[in-house]
Image (cartoon, rainbow, N blue to C red):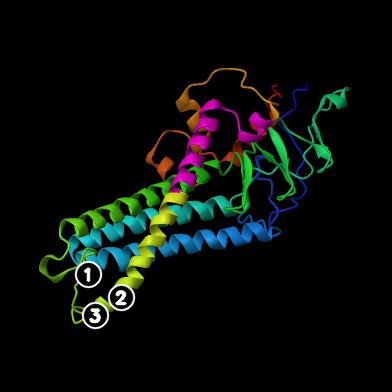
């Protein structure tokens, strides 16, 4: 394969809402907003995701904690903790959805073409040169650097520039599901330990409808909690499996599509911390746990992309 130069031509982008520009130093500037708006299935999945997260917030705060603990300090602390995890999951989802995953410039071209142009990888759909470790996404209609997969739940590709946010999204969603299951379990154990103590039923509700007017809400609240139970199991298992799969890909330095096509193998063995830092940023910090833009000692991924495009193709 030909060792491509780090210089490239950038004239336009097909998918972003605004074109990127070249800075004075010749590095790419990340565009403000990225949105895949040609996939109805993805848009519906995003709506369902937000609806389910908001439903979990509603049930935990209004149907589980307040009727059980009342407006106490413990209730407020648990509500704040659950809403914080929920907020991080939502923020991570929005970051994943609205962040350019690493789309190759539509007219990317190595500056120094050698005589054997056939050795350069080409994309038949983009009708242009394809950098090492880039794959074409039919939904985004672009080649994506270090593409792992296209996820309809975030309506975007998971690639080099937003994999951190995707890992945080599935991680916080799994944590949120586990949190809800733990609260439901504690509520059930409390109800079974004191089935009718002090005029309260096994779910902790006051039997008299005159007590804060909650007696009439019991059947609906139980139904809400049953729905939350099944939602937590299904999405907890799904997101936990996705998080493990993503971490395995990061630690193995091989994306999901690269494993499927078997078209890339790491040339050297890297430490786990080095592989993680290539996705979450450098240096290691608490920002790894927050859906903030990835930084490499102050540089963005788009500042580093000339080195990525210049790396030799490894199989």
Task: Give x and y (percent) for residue 130.
Answer: 76, 35
Q: Residues within 10 Å of mark 2 (few under 14, many from 20)?
A: few
Front residue (pair 215, 268): 215
Residue at image location 78% in from the left, 22% down from the top = 2
Disc 3 and disc 2: Cα gap in Å? 8 Å
Q: Looking at the image, tell me whether mark 1 or mark 3 is earlier in sequence order.
A: 1
What SS does tag 2 mark? helix
Residue occupying image coordinates x 60% and y 39%: 160
204 with respect to 84 (left or right): left
Choose top left, top right, bottom left or bottom right for residue 66: bottom left
Look at the picture and state if 139 lies above or below 265: below
**Residue 247 lies within the magenta run:** yes
Position of residue 212 measured from the top left corner of the image (x, y, whole percent): 21, 78
Disc ID at residue 79: none
Q: Which mark is residue 217?
A: 2
Image x and y of residue 218, in percent: 29, 72
Percent of width and height locating residue 241: 49, 40
Label 1, label 3: how many angstroms apart (C-alpha)?
A: 10 Å
Q: Residue 205 shows which numbered tag?
A: 1
The verdict on residue 207 being magenta is no
The residue indicated by pointer 3 is: 213
Quick check: marks 2 and 1 in contact, CB under 8 Å? yes
Circles 3 and 2, Cβ within 8 Å, touching? The answer is yes
List the single residue furthest toward the bottom: 210
What residue sits 61% from the left and 21% below the top? Answer: 266
Report the span colored magenta. Answer: 236-260
- Secondary structure state at the residue bearing disc 1: loop
Note whether 261 is above or below 293 in the view shown: above
Q: Secondary structure at mark 3?
A: loop
């Amino acid at each position: 394969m030909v060792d491509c130069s780090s210089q490239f031509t950038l004239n336009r982008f097909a998918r972003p809402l605004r074109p990127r520009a070249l800075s004075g130093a010749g590095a790419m500037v990340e565009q403000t907003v990225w949105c895949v708006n040609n996939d109805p299935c993805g848009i519906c999945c995003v709506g369902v995701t937000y609806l389910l997260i908001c439903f979990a917030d509603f049930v935990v705060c209004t149907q589980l904690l307040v009727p059980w603990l009342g407006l106490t300090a413990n209730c407020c602390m648990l509500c704040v903790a659950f809403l914080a995890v929920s907020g991080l999951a939502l923020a991570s989802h929005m970051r994943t959805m609205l962040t350019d995953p690493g789309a190759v410039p539509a007219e990317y071209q190595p500056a120094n073409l050698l005589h054997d142009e056939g050795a350069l990888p080409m994309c038949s759909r983009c009708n242009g040169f394809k950098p090492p470790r880039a794959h074409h996404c039919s939904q985004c209609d672009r080649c994506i650097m270090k593409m792992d997969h296209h996820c309809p739940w975030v309506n975007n590709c998971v690639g080099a520039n937003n994999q951190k946010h995707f890992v945080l999204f599935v991680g916080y969603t799994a944590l949120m599901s586990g949190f809800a299951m733990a609260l439901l379990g504690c509520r059930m154990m409390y109800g079974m330990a004191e089935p009718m103590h002090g005029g309260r039923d096994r779910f902790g509700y006051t039997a008299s409808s005159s007590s804060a007017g909650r007696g009439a809400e019991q059947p609906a609240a139980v139904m809400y909690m049953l729905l939350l139970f099944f939602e937590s199991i299904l999405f907890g298992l799904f997101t936990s499996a996705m998080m493990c799969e993503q971490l395995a890909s990061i630690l193995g330095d091989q994306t999901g599509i690269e494993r499927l096509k078997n078209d890339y193998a790491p040339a050297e063995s890297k430490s786990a911390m080095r592989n993680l830092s290539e996705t979450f940023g450098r240096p290691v910090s608490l920002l790894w746990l927050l859906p903030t833009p990835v930084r490499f000692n102050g540089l963005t991924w788009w500042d580093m992309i000339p080195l990525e495009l210049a790396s030799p193709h490894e199989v």
